Image: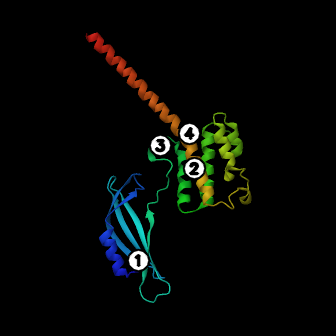
C-alpha cells in the first residue's frame, strides 16, 4: 500500500532502464526512461505515463503503469497493478517490415488494416479485412474474382492441399452472403481474429514472400558465379 507521493518516488528511482520488445524495430532491447507524469482517475486510481527511448533504434515508446485505489478506504491507499499498456501497439508479430516488402501493395494495405482493427479489438472489422486481403491475394494468384472465396481457394492448382484444408477449417472464410446476417461475422471473437491472422501471415509468407526470397537468392548466386567466372578467366588470361 502506498501514497501517490511514494509511488512517484518509486517510478523516478527505479524505472530507469527496462528490457522490452520495441514496437518500432522489433528488437528485444534496453529502453531508457526519459519522462513520466501521472493522472488520477475519477475512481481515485492512478495511471502513470512513462516515455522511453529504444537504445538500438532511438525511437520513443510510451508505457502506462497502473495503481488501483482500495475501494473501501477513504484515505489515499494505492495497490500496484503494474505495467498496463504500450504505445505504439506492435501490430504484427508474424511478419517483419522486410518481408512485407515482397507483398503486393493492394494486398498489404488490406492486411495492415486488418491488423489495426485487431489492435483495437474490432473483431468483425478485422476478420472482414483479413478475408478481403485473402481474396485480393487469390485473385492476384489467378483466381476468378467472380467466384466465392472458398471456390477461389479450390480453383488454384498451385495452392498446397494443406493450405486449402486449413482455409476450410476457418469459419469466417465460409461463403460470404449478400446480407449482414449471412457473412459469418456476427459472433466472431478474438480467437477467430487470431486464427485468421495466423492463416493470412503464413499464406502470404508461403505464396508471396518465400518465392521472391528464393528468386533473389538465385539471382545473387548466379551473379556471383558469373562474376567469379569472369574474374577467373581474366586471371588466367593475364598469366
In the figure, 208 relative to 46: above or below? above
Label whose residue precedes the other's in the sequence (2 or 4): 2
Q: How is the image coloured?
A: rainbow
Identify which residue, 102 or 85, lies in the foreground: 85
x, y percentage for residue 46?
A: 43, 77
**Mark 1–mark 2 distance (CA, rounded to whole Å):** 37 Å
Residue count near mark 3 (Cα–Cα under 10 Å), binned few <14, some 14–19, many ≥20 = some
- Left or right: 164 in relation to 113: right
In the figure, 58 relative to 153: above or below? below
Residue at 50 percent across and 84 percent down: it is 71
Quadrant including the N terminus: bottom left
Residue at 61 percent across and 52 percent down: it is 195
Label whose residue precedes the other's in the sequence (2 or 3): 3
x, y percentage for residue 81?
A: 45, 73
- Left or right: 36 in relation to 137: left
Whether pointer 2 and pointer 4 mark residues with C-beta atoms closer than 8 Å, the reply is: no
In the figure, 226 relative to 131: above or below? above
Please identify the quarter of the rendering in which residue 18 is found: bottom left
User: The residue tagged with tag 1: helix, strand or loop?
Assistant: strand
Residue count near mark 1 (Cα–Cα under 10 Å), binned few <14, some 14–19, many ≥20 = few
Label whose residue precedes the other's in the sequence (4 or 3): 3
**Mark 2–mark 4 distance (CA, rounded to whole Å):** 12 Å
Task: Determine which of the numbered discs, if any, sits on residue 198 in the image.
Answer: 2
**Mark 2–mark 3 distance (CA, rounded to whole Å):** 15 Å
x, y percentage for residue 98?
A: 44, 44
Q: What residue is shown with label 3? A: 99
Q: What residue is shown with label 4? A: 206
Amino acid at each position: 500500500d502506498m501514497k501517490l507521493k511514494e509511488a512517484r518516488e518509486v517510478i523516478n528511482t527505479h524505472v530507469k532502464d527496462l528490457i522490452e520488445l520495441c514496437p518500432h524495430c522489433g528488437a528485444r532491447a534496453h529502453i531508457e526512461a526519459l519522462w513520466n507524469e501521472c493522472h488520477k482517475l475519477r475512481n481515485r486510481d492512478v495511471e502513470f505515463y512513462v516515455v522511453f527511448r529504444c537504445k538500438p533504434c532511438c525511437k520513443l515508446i510510451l508505457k502506462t503503469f497502473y495503481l488501483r485505489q482500495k475501494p473501501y478506504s477513504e484515505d489515499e491507499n494505492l495497490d500496484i497493478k503494474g505495467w498496463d499498456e504500450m504505445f505504439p501497439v506492435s501490430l504484427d508479430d508474424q511478419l517483419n517490415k522486410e518481408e512485407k516488402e515482397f507483398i503486393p501493395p493492394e494486398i498489404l494495405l488490406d492486411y495492415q488494416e486488418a491488423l489495426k482493427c485487431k489492435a483495437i479489438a474490432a473483431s468483425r472489422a478485422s476478420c472482414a479485412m483479413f478475408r478481403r486481403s485473402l481474396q485480393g491475394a487469390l485473385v492476384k494468384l489467378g483466381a476468378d474474382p467472380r467466384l466465392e472465396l472458398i471456390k477461389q481457394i479450390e480453383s488454384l492448382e498451385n495452392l498446397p492441399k494443406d493450405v486449402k484444408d486449413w482455409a476450410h477449417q476457418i469459419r469466417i472464410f465460409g461463403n460470404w452472403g449478400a446480407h449482414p446476417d449471412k457473412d459469418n461475422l456476427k459472433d466472431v471473437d478474438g480467437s477467430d481474429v487470431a486464427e485468421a491472422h495466423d492463416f493470412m501471415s503464413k499464406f502470404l509468407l508461403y505464396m508471396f514472400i518465400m518465392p521472391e526470397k528464393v528468386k533473389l537468392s538465385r539471382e545473387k548466386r548466379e551473379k556471383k558465379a558469373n562474376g567469379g567466372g569472369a574474374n577467373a578467366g581474366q586471371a588466367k588470361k593475364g598469366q
